[in-house]
Amino acid sequence: MTQTRVRVGTSKTELAGKVGVSAAAIGQYEAGVDSPRPEVLEELARTLKVRPGFFSIGRPLARIDTVNAHFRSLSSARVSDRQKALARPIVAPRCG
């Protein structure tokens, strides 16, 4: 969930307000401490523009280490922009 939230550029507090739960609840969902109720899950999926199944257990998390990422200028790149770029899924090129 964290990866998707960062990709769309929203904070825990903003997401919580949109789906009607507390920011602490979003933190617990992201940490795997608690699971959202079905109606909250539907609202999370709608707000984050993913299918509800996206949040199912066993989904692989694509992570890019910041050491392996290149930004033209770290001093001019906002932290939020770097986080969005790192949250983008890696797509393998298609063989034709």
Image (cartoon, rainbow, N blue to C red):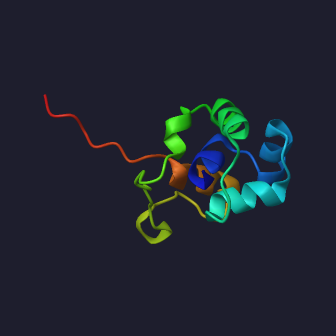
In this orientation, does residue 78 appear? Answer: no
Total marks drawn? 0
Q: Quadrant of residue 75?
A: bottom right
Q: Quadrant of residue 91?
A: top left
- In the image, is 29 to the left or to the right of 96? right
Q: Quadrant of the C terminus?
A: top left
Q: Is residue 91 above or below residue 35?
A: above
- In the image, is 3 to the left or to the right of 24? left
Which residue is located at x 68 percent, y 38 percent?
44
Residue situated furthest left in the rendering: 96
Residue situated furthest front in the rendering: 37
Q: Is residue 22 above or below residue 24?
A: above
- In the image, is 62 to the left or to the right of 80? left
Which residue is located at x 46 percent, y 60 percent?
70
Which residue is located at x 69 percent, y 48 percent?
36
- In the image, is 71 to the left or to the right of 10? left
**Front position in the image: 57 or 51:** 57
Q: Quadrant of residue 60?
A: bottom left
Query: Picture coordinates of residue 83 (x, y %)?
Result: 61, 56
Query: Picture coordinates of residue 53 (x, y %)?
Result: 50, 37
Query: Picture coordinates of residue 28 (x, y %)?
Result: 71, 62
**Front position in the image: 82 or 9:** 9
In this orientation, does residue 27 appear? Answer: yes
Which residue is located at x 73 percent, y 39 percent?
40
**Front position in the image: 55 or 70:** 55
Query: Picture coordinates of residue 43 (x, y %)?
Result: 71, 33
